[in-house]
Image (cartoon, helix red, strand yellow):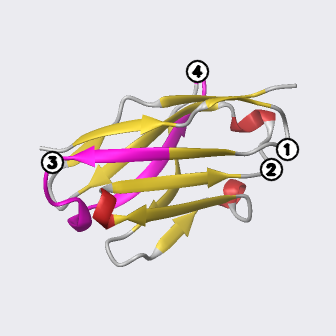
Amino acid sequence: QVQLVESGGGLVQPGGSLRLSCVASGSGFSRYVMGWYRQAPGKQRDLVATITTVGKINYVDFVKGRFTISRDNAKNAVYLQMNSLKPEDTAVYYCNAQGTVVRYWGQGTQVTVSP
C-alpha cells in the first residue's frame, strides 16, 4: 500500500511559478512510474507528465518547455516545477503512482492562476 500526499499548490499570477511536491509513504517507491495529472472543473482528469523508474520523462504538449518533472527515490518524492503559468493551467493537480497491477492517487492540490 502506498499513500501519496501532494503539496505546493496555491494562487499565482499568470507568468508565475509553483513547485508541487508529492511524498509517498510505504515501500517500493522506486519501482513505480510516477506521474502528475490535473483536473479542471467540469473536465476529465488529464495526464501532465510521467517519469519512469529509470528517469525516462514524458510531457504532454501543452506543458512542454514550461513544466519539469523530477523524482528523488531516496526521499520517496516526485516534483513538478511549473513555470510560465497560464490561467488555463488552473486545476487540481494529482500525484499518481503506477505499478504493474496497482495504481495509487493522492488527494490533489489546487493550483489557481489568476491576475
* Pointer 2 or 3: first along the chain: 3
Tell me the residue that label 2 is attached to.
84
Tell me the residue that label 3 is attached to.
26
Q: Residues within 10 Å of mark 4 (few under 14, many from 20)?
A: few
Q: CA distance from mark 4 to mark 3?
A: 32 Å
- The disc labelled 3 sits on which kind of residue? Gly
Q: CA distance from mark 1 to mark 3?
A: 36 Å
Measuring from the top left, give residue 89's x and y in whole percent.
70, 38
Q: Secondary structure at mark 3?
A: loop
Q: Residues within 10 Å of mark 3 (few under 14, many from 20)?
A: few
Measuring from the top left, give residue 65's x and y in whole percent.
74, 65
Q: Residue at x 42, y 63 (%)?
A: 71
Measuring from the top left, give residue 22's x and y in whole percent.
40, 45
* Pointer 4 or 3: first along the chain: 3
* Pointer 4 or 2: first along the chain: 4
- The disc labelled 1 sits on which kind of residue? Gly
Residue 15 is labelled as 1
**Which residue is at the far front?**
75
First to last magenta residue range: 21-42
Measuring from the top left, give residue 11's x and y in whole percent.
70, 26
User: Horizontal placement of 22 versus 73: left or right?
Assistant: right
The reply to whether discs 4 and 1 touch (Cβ–Cβ < 8 Å) is no
Residue 42 is labelled as 4
* Pointer 1 or 3: first along the chain: 1
| In front: label 4 or label 2 | 2
- The disc labelled 4 sits on which kind of residue? Gly
Q: Residue at x 37, y 29 (%)?
A: 107
Q: CA distance from mark 4 to mark 2?
A: 24 Å
Q: Secondary structure at mark 1?
A: loop
Q: Nearer the viewer, residue 3 or 45?
A: 3
